[in-house]
Image (cartoon, rainbow, N blue to C red):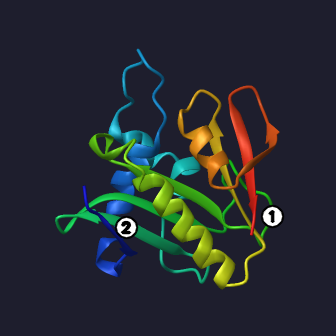
Amino acid sequence: MEYKIRPILKKEYGILEDFLYEAVFVPPGTPAPPRSITNRPELQVYVAGFGTKKDDIGLIAEMDHKPVGAVWVRIMNDYGHIDNDTPSFAISLYKEYRGLGIGTALMKEMLRILKDRGYKQASLSVQKANYAVSMYQKTGFEIVDENEEEYIMLCRL
């Protein structure tokens, strides 16, 4: 499968809402939440007004001219917030495109961009049961804090 990673276009910012829903971790055997879950304030922080802050950066993975995944960062007070100089990651792919290395490629490209722009570190939050924990570790993230359900992970650039 051939895919291309490219910067998100301004006209595509709305698609981040779809990828935000795809990023919601649903444990096996649990029904998926309604799409309206993304309207919660603690999730809207990831997408509301995206592109209006200097630290908003997004990439799209595309196959056959169709977005299949996205990674985006911004400095926000989210679950993975470290400080006001550390961008937080959000990433997801449509289910049928997971496990193909696309997510890893998106992560690596975003980390490269952040390093090139002078950021010292990036963070994310992930549910402990999420299979993506190992992918984050392979791309350089380390667990720096945790609560009952989630890890806070940090990647030094």
- What residue did someone put label 1 on? 83
Residue at 78% across / 69% down in the picture?
Answer: 84
Percent coordinates x, y for residue 22 in the rendering:
38, 44
Seen in the picture, residue 70 relative to 79 is either above or below; the reply is below
* Residue 40: numbered disc: none
Q: Nearer the viewer, residue 52 or 145?
A: 145
Residue 94 x, y percent position in the rendering = 31, 46
Tell me the quadrant of the picture where the N terminus can be found. Answer: bottom left
> Could you say whether the residue bearing mark 1 is in a helix, strand or loop?
loop
Horizontally, residue 44 falls left or right of residue 118, namely left
Calculate the distance from the C-alpha at mark 2 to the C-alpha at mark 1: 26 Å
Q: Residue at x 66, y 53 (%)?
A: 78
Image position of 141 with respect to 28: above or below: below
Q: Position of residue 13 (x, y in %)?
A: 36, 70
Q: Position of residue 57 (x, y in %)?
A: 52, 75
42 and 9: which is toward the camera: 9
Q: Residue at x 55, y 75 (%)?
A: 56
Identity of the residue furthest to the front in this view? 1
Secondary structure category for the residue under label 2 = strand
- Can residue 23 be seen? yes
Q: Amino acid at mark 2?
A: Ile
* Residue 60 - label: 2
Q: Identify which amino acid the numbered label 1 is placed on.
A: Asp
Of circles 2 and 1, the one toward us is 2
Does label 2 or label 1 sit earlier along the sequence? 2
- Quarter of the rendering containing residue 152: top right
Q: Quadrant of the C terminus?
A: bottom right
